[in-house]
């Protein structure tokens, strides 16, 4: 896959970022290095290898659920950058 300025612009738009000039070139180089790394990994022969499900053979220790202090709806909305009576307002990110 080739990383073009159009690809960078699309990714920046999806991530709500803005890259200009030299910064855009740096991001392009970083993405190309990442893709080259993944391509290098694809060269490995993984035939007959079981997928790694857990990173360790140690048992997983879970903490017990504890009831803590709860926020009221008004407290939760208090510092919201944008709200509409009872709800958080967020920018639309998906097109229908």
Image (cartoon, rainbow, N blue to C red):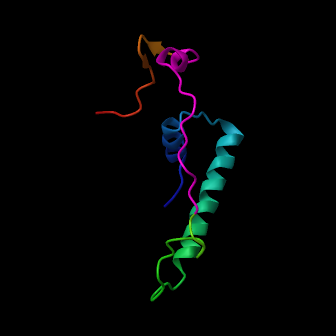
What is the residue that sits farthest to the bottom in this orientation? 48
What is the residue that sits farthest to the right in this orientation? 22
Residue at image x 58%, y 62%?
A: 61
Frontmost residue, 88 versus 93: 88
Residue range in magenta is: 61-80
Measured as percent of width and height from the top left, residue 70 is found at: 53, 27
8 within the magenta span:
no
Residue at image x 50%, y 36%?
A: 13
Frontmost residue, 91 versus 85: 85
Image vertical order of residue 17 relative to residue 73, above or below: below
Residue at image x 45%, y 87%?
A: 47
The number of numbered badges drawn on the structure is 0
Image vertical order of residue 9 relative to residue 3, above or below: above
Residue at image x 64%, y 48%?
A: 27
Left or right position of 57 against 92: right
Frontmost residue, 57 versus 7: 57
Left or right position of 91 against 96: right
What is the residue that sits farthest to the top in this orientation? 85
Residue 90's quadrant in the figure? top left
Left or right position of 53 against 92: right
Image vertical order of residue 74 relative to residue 49, above or below: above
Question: Which quadrant, please, contains the C terminus?
Answer: top left
Predominant SS along the magenta part: loop
Measured as percent of width and height from the top left, residue 21 is found at: 68, 38
Measured as percent of width and height from the top left, residue 7 is found at: 50, 47
Measured as percent of width and height from the top left, residue 49 is found at: 48, 85
């Amino acid at each position: 896959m080739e990383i073009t300025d159009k690809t960078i612009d699309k990714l920046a738009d999806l991530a709500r970022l803005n890259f200009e000039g030299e910064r855009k070139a740096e991001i392009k180089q970083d993405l190309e290095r990442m893709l080259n790394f993944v391509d290098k990994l694809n060269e490995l022969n993984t035939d007959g290898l079981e997928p790694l499900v857990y990173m360790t053979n140690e048992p997983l220790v879970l903490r017990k659920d504890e009831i803590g202090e709860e926020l009221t709806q008004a407290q939760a909305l208090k510092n919201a950058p944008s709200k509409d009576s009872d709800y958080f307002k967020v920018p639309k990110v998906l097109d229908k």
